[in-house]
Amino acid sequence: MTKTLLLTGASRGIGHATVKKFSREGWRVLTCSRHAFDPGCPWPGGEENHIQIDLADPADTINTVEVIRECLDGPLHALVNNAGISPKSDGGGRLNTLDTDLMTWGRVFHVNFFASIVLARGLKDELVDAKGAIVNVTSIAGSRVHPFAGAAYATSKAALAALTREMAHDFGPLGVRVNAIAPGEVDTAILSPGTDKIVENLAMRRLGQTSEVADVIFFLCNDGSSYVTGTEIEINGGQHI
């Protein structure tokens, strides 16, 4: 039987690499993004398996759950909550606790935090049917002040790590595992200027690759991790030591 993945934030970076990894392994991948499907995305069946959803809009997120369920038409083996936003100041700088307005806090938390539990709870029956797995994508910024990631982003990711533990406790008796990954400096199109200075101090002295992150996500969604739940795996080349 073909397994099915639902992935948010699929349009670039880690999400893009995750779709390619699961597709190569024979999974059906449903993608969610606020953008329409890009015909240039290099995986089969992408357009018919894409759902446009604005995770910053609570009503749209809740209402789209039924659309996702209809697209699934069966069990859901993995849900990867990868979507995340980190707004910057007008000059492209870091937004801290003193200059982040309330609307921005709310928008960031809706995408980075609330959407994860809305989707997981809304698709609970499909996840239970598959004895599936949930992976929440947090960040190294969730455990320490980061020079580029804003305060709203960082605190939303810290909250998502705590939510992962709570979800593991609640979903575990239903046969569904819930884990998180916390990437550090990964080579994507949205790296901030100055990241090279951080890399100089990493134990591994290099950026991570999106494919390396996708490999860990794949591990957490498969039988090799069948007794792993409630944990957060750091993928950061030794940035935490």
Image (cartoon, rainbow, N blue to C red):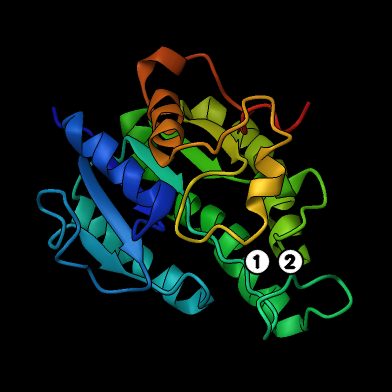
x and y percentages locating residue 24 in the rendered image: 18, 33
Judged left or right of residue 89, residue 204 is: left
Task: Specify whether 27 is left or right of 158.
Answer: left
Quadrant for the C terminus in the image: top right
Left/right placement of residue 183 relative to residue 59 reads right
Q: Which mark is residue 168?
A: none
Location of residue 118 in the rendering, given as x and y in whole percent from the top left corner? 51, 59
Q: Residue 141: horizontal and vertical position, in percent?
A: 72, 49
Q: Secondary structure at mark 1?
A: helix
Q: Residue at x 62, y 33 (%)?
A: 236
* Residue closest to the eye, 73 or 103: 103
Residue at mark 2 to residue at mark 1: CA–CA distance: 7 Å
Whether 71 is drawn above or below 210: the answer is: below
Marks 2,1: beta carbons within 8 A: yes
**Quarter of the image containing the N terminus?**
top left
> Image point 55% across, 45% down: which residue?
137
Identity of the residue drawn at 76% across and 73% down: 95
Residue 123 appears in the rendering: no
* Amino acid type indicated by mark 2: Ala
Residue identifier under label 2:
152
Q: Nearer the viewer, residue 109 or 95?
A: 95
For label 1, the residue is 109
Q: Secondary structure at mark 2?
A: helix
Q: Amino acid at mark 1?
A: Phe
Q: Is residue 59 above or below residue 120?
A: below
